[in-house]
Amino acid sequence: MLVRKGFVDKDKIWNFVKNLENKLNKEKWNGKDNSSGRKCLWFGVGVELGFNCSVFKGEEINDGLRKKCNELWGGEDWNSILVYKYDLGCELKDHIDRDIFDNKVVVVNISVDNLFGGNVEFNYGGKIEKLSNGEVIEFDNKILHGVKKVSSERWSLSIRKVLL
């Protein structure tokens, strides 16, 4: 079940992600750049995605970020943050997350507010959920999910527990 958990401060989250832009890397699969067009950055426990996932040390999680993520997660039993940037036309094909991740994921959607609401279309279990700028959701990542092609710049911040 998808749970809508509210909103974060839109200005603060945009400032946070925009300050990461020069640290982003092209998304990889099995050690090679993939064609998604997305860029990403891991904090805490990072994961090399592919058929055989491995972990690495991501960026440091400072106290302010840890405190906010504890609040959004509802505890301290998470260990990883994945930040993605989607440029115009990027998508995340429907998928189920790898077993290296706990089922629970908390995502902050960061999208452009515009006349049309800036909604991002999130496919979850075959149903389209419209996500607004700054919206926080929690869902089971073992249920088929993805993001339809975005019509403007979009970022996401996923709080996860990597199973070590």
Image (cartoon, rainbow, N blue to C red):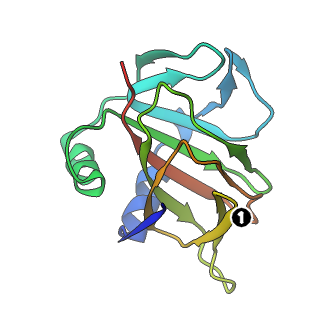
* Element type at mark 1: loop
State the residue position of label 1. Answer: 152
* Left or right side of 144 for 15: left
Residue 147 is situated, as x and y percent measured from the top left of the image, at 68, 55
Q: State how many labels appear.
A: 1
In which quadrant is the C terminus drawn?
top left
State the image quarter where residue 132 is shown: bottom right
Residue 46 is situated, as x and y percent measured from the top left of the image, at 45, 25
Residue drawn at (56%, 29%) of the image: 98
Residue drawn at (52%, 70%) of the image: 133
Between 89 and 105, the one nearer to me in the picture: 105
Furthest-bottom residue in this view: 115
Instruction: Name above or below for residue 7 compared with residue 109.
Output: below
Instruction: Name above or below for residue 45 compared with residue 103.
Output: above
Between 70 and 33, the one nearer to me in the picture: 70
Residue 97 is situated, as x and y percent measured from the top left of the image, at 57, 36
Instruction: Name above or below for residue 118 compared with residue 74.
Output: below
* Left or right side of 76 for 12: right
State the image quarter where residue 76 is shown: top left
Residue drawn at (63%, 57%) of the image: 125
